[in-house]
């Protein structure tokens, strides 16, 4: 019998021995009665396939294990309850079974960021054990306890279907060519046939996700799975009030707890206390005598021997505050007598665009519609909560206890979307030169823009340096809700005109965005909302103003779509009303107005390169016309940052050995499949097989290319890797082998520096490198429930069909939640929703059929013509659903989410199935 003693902190009470069978062996642990089974498995036995997404909420399914053969959520089960029982995780399944599961999920595309997938995989395995041939509906229903934010579930269901066929020995039917392309057996046959590296693994091929097997089986270590010898653990004490004057912090009770090493406050910060991606307005710790600005503010850091002790001691800190009335309405924030949230005032930014003569155009218009639209605050709901590890080192790389010495350095394991921004900001807080801080990306469990800003990286780094030991910090789900920025709620008042034939003649828009407490990238989000205010349509007369306003609400920042989603909902709804007045349908209204090559976009940029927007409209025309209750919307979204800021891609290929080439890049793998695309580009250019290449991201090489946002990674990183790989290929063509080239580095750089700021005084502005384009159709059934979504997108080039399908399915999933069920309400600066269940994110059994259609109209400036799809995927979704609902019940809805609709009611209160 193996005996592993559980950790016992000063806070443990009533500890007892718990004996059970774990993955086929008898084990015993000394565990406090209140500890969960999940905690025991991860901390005491290093079983990491069950992930902690929400303990103790039991809402995400990431922690699924088998107890006596039945799936159970281990975060909600006390460890003491498994005495004498059998617990099985993915680690304990037979190797043949593990291989089948991993291969099926990877080949079906049922894994993106991967954090939630072990839970799905184990639940799918258990389902097939009792029902070896379930229907898709039965699989979806069985998965209802598990949540995924990346995939949209379709490919997860594909994977479980494929796994069932493999286990039944059926193989793949000839009538299913798509499934055959994903079949592990078929893939193996292709491999044995001797296809070359580029033929099998290059651009356009269905190369399986990099490290996909590890992700599926839970073997991949995210930050919270990583254990460093000698680590301390940090817990943050958050503000109890959105706005309060911090008068004092009494640390005595916390310091008296056995196991507590230190309490850190603002007075301990040696460098800059304020950080920010663009504007330095966000304190890593609020100082005595300073006002808190939101409930996500951190007042102190408690460092202890274990996580539980740190968290419990943090609650013992005595905070003396003078509570003040928060400013929670952006309109109120703009009033002259409103309290100033920041010294310079409550208006963060104003973006304006003017073309033509709007007043004269309105005077001559045949039809005018004027309406106010409002979109809601949204939580990203990535499945992996924020975590960070900071490891102090000396010059000889040994862990050190003299963090103040000049030769000290720091190694930070971050899950952020921009490791170089993390490096810069952490160094500023420590008062160090950036070169002393090495930040390494640990590919994260989802982000969607929510991990662009630092969360607890600076605080964890500060704790490690001050304590002279490695420090780890992991947030709970509720803490994550408090801390990271959300999607901006925006109120938009539009006045839109057209002529008798439905051609747009004038648009006036006024947008007011609730920025929340800190700038983040909010000025840029509201800038993008303004730039996309008229959608992908021609209109020569525009007058647009967009404001980003500080409040004491949680901060808002980047989220998939980045302002274009909100703008799309408003303009597309106006087009629907104008179409009715003109007497044409939604498809015809858009066909008459969509941009074509040579037209001018809202920002003033002439679109002088070919694109396939009209092709996306044609692709959905018949389905839209044939449906009884259908809605349609088009979308456009910039790729890259642009707007006068440089867009750079940098990469270094280094020959590490005779059979390994590293790919160093500054962009983040966060589930979108970027590392897989890196390999495919390298394969395409060199002809080498995929297994040779190993992508990585850290700050040790000069590859700083900014945040991983707006599809920048695929488009910009693709060009950089392409250029570096061509240089390697030249040496290979000259007769050299990889063994001859060990130690050689090949650099690729790309920079788009010609973009101009919105409203710049230039006759031919170019605000962005390229754009994504889309048309989507939502179809309802006779009861008003969602039946199908058709998404036709011009992607420029399909880089990897399996990854692309998954990206689009996941985008639609997020877009449908945005349209119908999801919101993150805040009342007087306080969170109203603190659980995952309260967010109403769609589950597998709630998703309609999604059909994807990909148009390839290559952009001549990008790698292989790719446009990227990370942002555009859900831009048209909400307005398409709104139009379908209006076709069903005649109600013109102006506010998201549309919870009052029959489509939302069918999700939130499903009809009872007949017995």
Image (cartoon, rainbow, N blue to C red):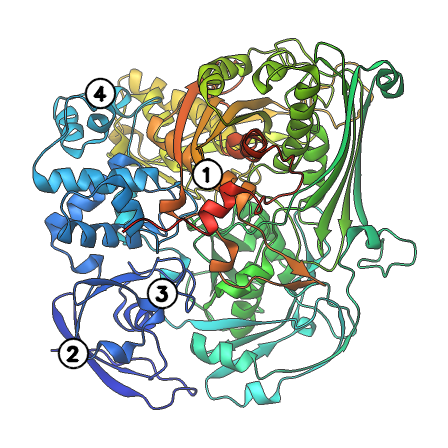
- The CA span between labels 4 and 2 is 53 Å
Q: Is residue 610 above or below residue 276?
A: above
Q: Point out which mark residue 84 bears.
A: 2
In this picture, is 582 found above or below 5? Answer: above
- Residue 401 in percent (x, y) is at 49, 73
Q: Is mark 4 on a helix, strand or loop?
A: loop
Is residue 658 or residue 162 the one in the foreground?
162
Residue 439 drawn above or below residue 873: below
Q: Distance between the residues labelled 3 and 1?
A: 47 Å
Residue at horizontal 92 percent and vertical 54 percent from the top: 336
- Compared across the picture, whether 758 is left or right of 411 comes to right
Residue situated in front as seen by the camera: 271 or 40: 40
Q: Which of labels 1 and 4 is toward the front?
A: 1
Residue beneath disc 3: 227
Q: Residues within 10 Å of mark 4 (few under 14, many from 20)?
A: some
- Residue 570 image offset from top left, x and y in percent: 68, 33
- For the residues marked 4 and 3, what is the alpha-carbon distance in whole angstroms? 39 Å
Mark number displayed over residue 785: 1
What is the spatial separation of the Cα atoms under label 3 and label 2, in whole angstroms?
Answer: 29 Å
Of marks 4 and 3, which one's residue comes earlier in the chain?
4
Q: Which residue, given by chain and number where applicable, does mark 4 sit on?
A: 196
Q: Position of residue 703 (x, y in %)?
A: 51, 37
Count of numbered labels shown in the rendering:
4
Q: Are marks 3 and 2 in contact (CB under 8 Å)?
A: no
């Amino acid at each position: 019998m193996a005996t592993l003693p559980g950790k016992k902190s000063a806070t443990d009470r009533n500890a007892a021995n718990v004996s059970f069978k774990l993955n086929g062996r008898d084990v015993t642990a000394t565990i406090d009665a209140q500890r969960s089974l999940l905690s025991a498995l991860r901390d005491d036995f290093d079983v990491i396939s069950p992930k902690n997404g929400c303990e103790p909420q039991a809402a995400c399914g990431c922690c699924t294990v088998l107890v006596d053969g039945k799936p159970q959520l281990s975060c909600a089960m006390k460890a003491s309850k498994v005495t004498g029982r059998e617990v099985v995780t993915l680690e304990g399944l037979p190797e043949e079974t593990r291989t089948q599961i991993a291969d099926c999920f990877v080949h079906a595309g049922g894994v993106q960021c991967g954090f939630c997938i072990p839970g799905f995989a184990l639940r799918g395995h258990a389902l097939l054990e009792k029902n070896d041939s379930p229907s898709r509906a039965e699989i979806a229903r069985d998965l209802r306890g598990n949540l995924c934010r990346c995939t949209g579930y379709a490919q997860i269901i594909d994977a479980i279907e494929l796994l069932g066929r493999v286990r039944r020995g059926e193989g793949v039917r000839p009538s299913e060519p798509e499934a055959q392309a994903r079949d592990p057996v078929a893939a193996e046959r292709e491999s044995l046939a001797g296809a070359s590296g580029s033929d099998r693994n290059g651009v356009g091929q269905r190369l399986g996700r990099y490290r996909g097997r590890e992700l599926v089986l839970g073997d991949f270590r995210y930050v919270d799975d990583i254990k460093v010898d000698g680590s301390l653990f940090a817990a943050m004490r958050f503000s109890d009030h959105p706005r309060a004057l911090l008068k004092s912090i009494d640390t005595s009770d916390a310091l008296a707890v056995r196991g507590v090493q230190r309490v850190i406050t603002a007075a301990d910060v040696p460098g800059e206390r304020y950080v920010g991606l663009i504007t330095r307005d966000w304190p890593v710790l609020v100082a005595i005598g300073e006002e808190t600005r939101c409930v996500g503010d951190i007042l102190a850091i408690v460092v202890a021997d274990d996580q539980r002790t740190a968290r419990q001691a943090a609650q013992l800190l005595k905070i003396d505050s003078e509570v003040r009335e928060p400013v929670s309405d952006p309109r109120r924030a703009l009033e002259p007598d409103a309290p100033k949230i920041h010294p310079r005032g409550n208006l963060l930014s104003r973006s304006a665009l003017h073309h033509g003569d709007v007043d004269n155009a309105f005077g001559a218009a045949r039809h005018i519609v004027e309406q106010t639209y409002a979109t809601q605050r949204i939580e990203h709901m990535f499945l992996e909560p924020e975590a960070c590890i900071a490891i102090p080192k000396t010059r000889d790389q040994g862990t050190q206890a003299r963090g103040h010495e000049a030769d000290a350095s720091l190694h930070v394991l971050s899950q952020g979307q921009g490791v170089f921004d993390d490096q810069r900001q952490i160094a500023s807080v420590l008062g160090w030169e950036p070169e002393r801080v090495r930040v390494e990306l640990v590919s994260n469990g989802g982000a969607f823009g929510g991990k662009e800003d630092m969360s607890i990286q600076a605080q964890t780094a500060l704790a490690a340096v001050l304590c002279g030991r490695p420090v780890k910090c992991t947030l709970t789900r509720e803490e994550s809700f408090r801390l990271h920025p959300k999607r901006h709620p925006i109120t938009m008042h539009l006045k839109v005109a057209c002529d008798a034939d439905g051609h747009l003649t004038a648009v006036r828009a006024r947008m007011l965005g609730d920025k929340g407490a800190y700038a983040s990238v909010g000025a840029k989000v509201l800038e993008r909302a303004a730039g996309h205010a008229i959608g992908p349509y021609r209109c020569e007369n525009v007058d647009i103003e967009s404001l980003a306003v500080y409040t004491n609400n949680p901060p808002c920042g980047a989220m998939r779509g980045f302002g274009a989603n909100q703008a799309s909902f408003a303009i597309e709804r106006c087009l629907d009303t104008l179409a009715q007045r003109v007497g044409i349908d939604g498809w015809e209204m858009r066909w008459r107005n969509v941009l074509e090559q040579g037209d001018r976009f809202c920002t003033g940029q002439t679109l002088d390169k070919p694109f396939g927007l009209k092709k996306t409209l044609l692709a959905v025309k018949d389905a839209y016309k044939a449906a009884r209750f259908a809605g349609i919307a088009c979308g456009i979204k910039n790729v890259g940052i642009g707007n006068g800021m440089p867009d750079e891609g940098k990469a270094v290929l280094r020959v590490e050995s005779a059979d390994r080439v590293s790919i160093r890049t500054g962009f983040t793998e966060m589930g979108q499949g970027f590392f897989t695309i890196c390999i495919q580009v390298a394969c395409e250019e060199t002809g080498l097989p995929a297994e040779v290449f190993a992508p990585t991201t850290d700050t040790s090489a000069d590859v700083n290319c900014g945040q991983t946002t707006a599809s920048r990674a695929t488009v910009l990183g693709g060009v950089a890797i392409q250029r570096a790989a061509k240089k390697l290929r030249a040496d290979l063509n000259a007769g050299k082998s990889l063994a001859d080239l060990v130690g050689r580095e090949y650099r690729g750089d790309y920079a788009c520096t010609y973009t101009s700021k919105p409203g710049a005084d230039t006759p031919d502005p170019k605000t962005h490198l390229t754009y994504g384009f889309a048309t989507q159709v939502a179809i309802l059934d006779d009861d008003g429930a969602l039946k199908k979504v058709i998404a036709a997108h011009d992607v420029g080039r399909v880089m990897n069909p399996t990854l692309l399908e998954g990206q689009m399915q996941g985008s639609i999933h997020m877009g449908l939640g945005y349209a119908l069920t999801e919101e993150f309400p805040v009342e007087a600066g306080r969170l109203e929703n603190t659980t995952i269940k309260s967010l109403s994110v769609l589950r597998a059994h709630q998703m309609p059929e999604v059909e994807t259609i990909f148009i390839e109209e290559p952009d001549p400036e990008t790698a292989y013509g790719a446009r990227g799809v990370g942002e555009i995927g859900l831009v048209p979704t909400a307005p398409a659903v709104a139009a379908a609902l209006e076709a069903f019940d005649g109600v013109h809805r102006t506010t998201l989410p549309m919870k009052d609709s029959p489509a939302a009611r069918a999700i939130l209160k499903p009809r009872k199935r007949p017995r």
